[in-house]
Image (cartoon, helix red, strand yellow):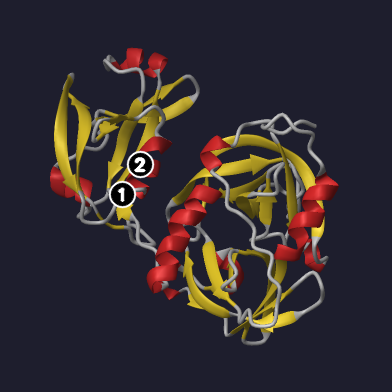
């Protein structure tokens, strides 16, 4: 295989260089023990894993594990402190005392540069089998996958590399051994790897870690709509003068979009085998950034700060207007109308 730099993909070399920085995680919740994986972020002893590996519960009631231990490739086991966890991106931040240990931090890559077809290596502890290696390719980028909240993780990396229970939080590595994401979930009917796995992208991890390191909590902006994708044939069918955008299907009562007067769908049609809520606004831009896909709306809003006011480019009654919306802090759960 050839990676995106044009160099031969050497899984053995990647594993040799990266495995000292990969850890297995054991979290205790009363009488239960959960397992997962993670990697060393820096020489200060900070470690990245999934939030669902080190916390449990639903919504606002999610609580940290009572104890967390991490095991290194050389067999050393150390207690870890939970610095924070982010249920929206499913990212957790731990810290160990690094004194007396020669740590091997792994570098976070730029996930915007990840391309479909590039080879990747995944290290983790599937079914408790510590520091196992699997390889594959990036099957697709920019997927939307479930988080630990009512919101999606945008920009997720899909792979055919084997991911199983216990891989969660382990690094997904490019040809240079840099972390492009962390294993987050599998999709299939068997409960094990069916060749469709997903990872939280490294850029989402960076955004999350910056906040977790500051105050142990991650905050995201919220606009309060559910949308469906607009594409050229559907636009022609609906008589909308735009080739792409986000059809506003529903507006969450009392949310920022509702307060700004954004209108949801009031009719429903079936077109090309899919059901669409129509008659509402169509969002085509945010502060001048065009919405090419419906998921772009969540991705762009997720990069903004609660309290910011943005200008939504909206097509309403055949005309494009600008609607000012003041973003709020994203809740873990929403109540649809």
Asked whether, in this view, residue 19 is left or right of residue 140, the answer is: right
Distance from label 2 to label 1 (Cα)? 7 Å
Asked whether, in this view, residue 85 is left or right of residue 304, the answer is: right
Q: Position of residue 222 (x, y in %)?
A: 30, 52
Contact (Cβ within 8 Å) of mark 2 with mark 1 = yes
Q: Position of residue 248 (x, y in %)?
A: 30, 35
- Label 2 sits on a secondary structure element that is helix
Q: At x 54% / y 43%, what residue is drawn?
A: 110
Question: How packed is label 2: few (under 14 Cα within 10 Å), some, or many (20 or more)?
Answer: some
- Label 1 sits on a secondary structure element that is loop
Q: At x 18% / y 45%, what residue is drawn?
A: 325
Asked whether the viewer can see residue 149, the reply is no
Instruction: Classify 101 as above or below 303.
Output: below
Query: Where residue 133 is drawn, which disc sits there?
Result: none
Residue named by callout 1: 304
Q: Nearer the viewer, residue 249 or 329?
A: 329
Q: Total number of numbered labels?
A: 2
Q: At x 71% / y 59%, what residue is drawn?
A: 167
Instruction: Classify 118 as above or below 194.
Output: above
Task: Locate residue 210: give its quadrant.
Answer: bottom left
Asked whether, in this view, residue 257 is left or right of residue 27, the answer is: left
Instruction: Classify 10 as above or below 220.
Output: above
Q: Nearer the viewer, residue 268 or 253?
A: 253
Asked whether the viewer can see residue 285, the reply is yes
Residue named by callout 2: 300
Q: At x 54% / y 50%, what residue is drawn?
A: 202
Q: Position of residue 80 (x, y in %)?
A: 61, 80
Task: Locate residue 111: give its quadrant.
Answer: top right
Q: Quadrant of the N terminus?
A: top right
């Amino acid at each position: 295989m050839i990676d995106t730099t044009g160099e031969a993909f050497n899984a053995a070399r990647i594993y040799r260089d990266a495995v000292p920085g990969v850890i297995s995680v054991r979290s205790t919740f009363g009488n239960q023990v959960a397992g997962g994986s993670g990697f060393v972020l820096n020489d200060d002893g900070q470690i990245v894993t999934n939030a669902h590996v080190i916390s449990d519960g639903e919504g606002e009631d999610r609580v940290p594990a009572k104890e967390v231990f991490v095991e290194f490739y050389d067999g050393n086991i150390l207690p870890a402190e939970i610095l924070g966890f982010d249920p929206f991106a499913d990212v957790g931040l731990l810290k160990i005392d690094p004194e007396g240990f020669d740590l091997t931090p792994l570098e976070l890559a730029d996930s915007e540069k990840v391309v479909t077809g590039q080879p990747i290596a995944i290290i983790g502890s599937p079914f408790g089998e510590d520091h196992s290696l699997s390889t594959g390719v990036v099957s697709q980028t920019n997927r939307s996958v479930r988080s630990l909240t009512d919101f999606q993780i945008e920009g997720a990396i899909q792979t055919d590399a084997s991911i199983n229970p216990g891989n969660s939080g382990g690094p997904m590595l490019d040809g240079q051994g840099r972390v492009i994401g962390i294993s987050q979930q599998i999709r299939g009917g068997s409960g094990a790897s069916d060749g469709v796995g997903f990872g939280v992208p490294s850029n989402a991890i960076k955004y999350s870690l910056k906040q977790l390191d500051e105050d142990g909590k991650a905050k995201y902006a919220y606009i309060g709509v559910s949308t469906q994708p607009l594409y050229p044939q559907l636009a022609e069918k609906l008589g909308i003068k735009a080739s792409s955008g986000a059809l506003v299907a529903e507006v969450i009562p009392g949310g920022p979009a509702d307060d700004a007067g954004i209108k949801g769908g009031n009719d429903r049609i079936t077109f090309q085998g899919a059901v669409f809520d129509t008659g509402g606004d169509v969002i085509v831009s945010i502060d001048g950034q065009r919405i090419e896909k419906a998921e772009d709306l969540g991705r762009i809003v997720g990069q903004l700060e609660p309290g910011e006011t943005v200008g939504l480019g909206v097509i309403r009654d055949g005309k494009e207007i600008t609607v000012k919306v003041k973003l709020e802090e994203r809740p873990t759960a929403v109540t649809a109308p």
